[in-house]
Structure formats: C-alpha cells, structure tokens
Image (cartoon, rainbow, N blue to C red):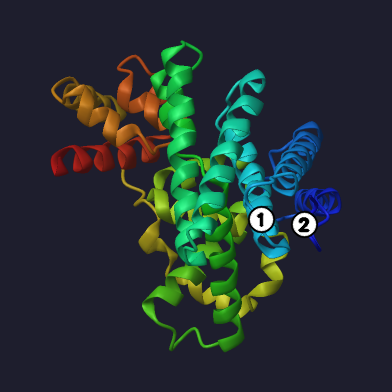
Amino acid sequence: MPIEGFDYKAFAMDLSKQAAEVLMQPGSNAAPDTLTDKDKKNIVETVRKFCYMAGEALSNDAQIKFNAEQASLVTQFIGEWTFHKSIDLINGKIPPQNREAILQIIAANIFNTAKLAIIKKMPQDTLVNLVEEKVKNVYNDELQKLVKRGILTQQQYDSAVNKSNLNDMVQKTEDASKLEEIQQEKAVNSASPTDKKVLKFAALAIILKKIPPQKANEILNSLDKNDAKHIFNYMKMSNIEDKIDHKIIIKALEEIKNILPKPDVVNVPKLLKHHYKLIQTTSPEILSSIAMNERETVKDFILDKNFPAAEVFSPLVIQSLVNSIEEKINDN
C-alpha cells in the first residue's frame, strides 16, 4: 500500500538530479575534479536506481507502516551514502566490475539499519551516527574480501579504505568558510595564530597555482601532510585570488618561510643510506602503520628499499621525508 505523500519514483529522480547538479558544478566541494563524465553518469544512475528500489520496498512493506518523512529519511540516507561511497570506490581504484556489488551491500545495510532504528524510535542524531558507522564497517569488510580474493593487494586496501569523499567535502567547506570569515574581518595584523596560518596557506596556494605542477608538487610533498591538504584545497578554489586582499597576500608571504623547507645543502646519498638502514631495522608492522595514510609514492619510499627516491623526489623533499619518517619511527 502506497505511503501517503511519498512518491518514491519522483523522490528517487529528484535525489539523482541533485547528485548530477553537484557533480556538474565547477569547483564543487562535494566531488573531486578527477571524475570522468562516465564516472558521473554512473554515479547519478546508481543513486537513482538504489533510491528507487529502497522507496519501492518501503511503499510495499505490509508489515511496517512508515510515514512520508520516515520513508524519505531512509531513502535519502541511501542516496547520500551511495553518492559518497561511489566516489570513494573510484578514488580508491577499486576495479569497476566490483563497485556496484559493494554499493548494493552498503545500501542494503543502510536500509535495514535505518529502518530498525526508526522502529525503535531512536533520536535522529543517534540514527545518523549509527548509519555512518555501519557504512564504514561494511565498506572496510567488503574491501578486505577483495584482498582475500586476490583482487586487491594489502597496500591497495590500505590506500582505498582511507578514502572518504564525505570527510574531504567537510574539510573543503570548512577551509572555504574560514577563509571567508578572515577576509571579512580584514584584520591580518590582529588575527589569531590560527587565522594567520590559514592566510599563509591561502597565499602559498595562490603562488603554487602559478608555477609548474611538478615544482608545486615537490613543495607540497615537503610539507606536513595536514598542512598540504589545506593548501591543496585552497589551490582548487577557482576564485581564491579574489577572496584575499593583495596587501594581505604580501603580508602573509613575508611570514611563509616558517612553513617551507630550509634551503640547506642536502647530501642525498648520505640521507638515503641513513633512511634505508633505519627501515631495515624497523619492524614491518611499524612501517606499514606509518605508511598507511601517506601518498602512494611516499608509501613506496617507506616500504620498498629499491624505490628510486632520487629520481622521484627533489633533495629538499627527500630531506623532509627522511626526517619525518625517522620522527614517526622514534615515536613508536
């Protein structure tokens, strides 16, 4: 029996249209620029299909009578998480033939978890957290199954399991909001240390956008990973140059030396010899733990003693990486 006020066909179509609008929007915080047109079409169609099936199942359930608001909530959960995990599977380089099956399992778990939580009359914030935790656990489990089947290596799993489009979206939005807030105040001299750091990141991003990509990547790779993430987010803002007064940019750049590597003479052979000796005397478990959240090339540098670091990284980047890795090993 249909749910009064809940047109699941129209709702599924509306959610898929929202997904399409987000994906097609230039510089969207909710989707990476690396998605192809084919990726975007697949995501939109998958959102529509899964939302349609969920809405239809709720409407035809003779035992549980949900109202329109409850049915919409369950369906929207499936739409939003299908959107984000579709992107995570693409960014995680999961083989295309395995993606839909994983998304189906995630959607089914969301459906059952959300439905049961609503029946138990859980508060909505509890329901949101419950669904998020279920999605995370199921996603991890399904990727681990691919490892056991030999479809993914453990290294590929470690990389893919840490992809989170939702977290990236939140981080980008927070970065943009913080920059807008500081710009509105226009008080760089009296800004807090945190605000000054944001301005330095934004100013550096403007500079990096104007230099060759290879050189920009070398500088990003030499910085703290969390700092580099913020700077990269600012680099992706299409109109960041218009968001900051040029006088503020100049002021921030005067202080930017504090977050850039010092231009010392680097003895690369000596550094690499020290590095390889260090990783040979460190347990594989500790090395894997340190490498888990790093970029692919940095992971290889940590885990593979034959990695051609001198050909991939500049001397300053090698110096920064060796120092950082040694600190993390000592912390363990």
- Report whether residue 313 is seen: no
Q: Position of residue 256 (x, y in %)?
A: 44, 65
- Of labels 1 and 2, earlier in sequence is 2
Q: CA distance from mark 1 to mark 2?
A: 8 Å
Dot 2 corresponds to which residue?
3
- Report whether residue 224 is seen: yes
Using the image, tell me which numbered label, if any, was put on residue 65. Answer: 1
Q: Is residue 162 above or below residue 123?
A: above
Q: Is residue 276 above or below residue 227?
A: above
Using the image, tell me which numbered label, if any, was put on residue 259. Answer: none
Q: Position of residue 258 (x, y in %)?
A: 36, 63
Q: Are marks 1 and 2 in contact (CB under 8 Å)?
A: yes
Q: Is residue 58 above or below residue 174?
A: above
Q: Position of residue 229 (x, y in %)?
A: 49, 52
- Residue at point 43%, 17% (across, down): 147
Q: Seen from this angle, which residue lies furthest front?
A: 63
Q: Position of residue 94 (x, y in %)?
A: 58, 25
Q: Is residue 280 left or right of residue 217?
A: left
The image quadrant where one finds the C terminus is top left
- Residue at point 55%, 43% (across, down): 112
- Residue at point 58%, 72% (across, down): 177
- Residue type indicated by callout 1: Lys
What is the secondary structure assignment of the residue under circle 2?
loop
- Residue type indicated by callout 2: Ile
Q: Is residue 274 left or right of residue 204?
A: left
| Foreground pick, 240 / 131 | 131
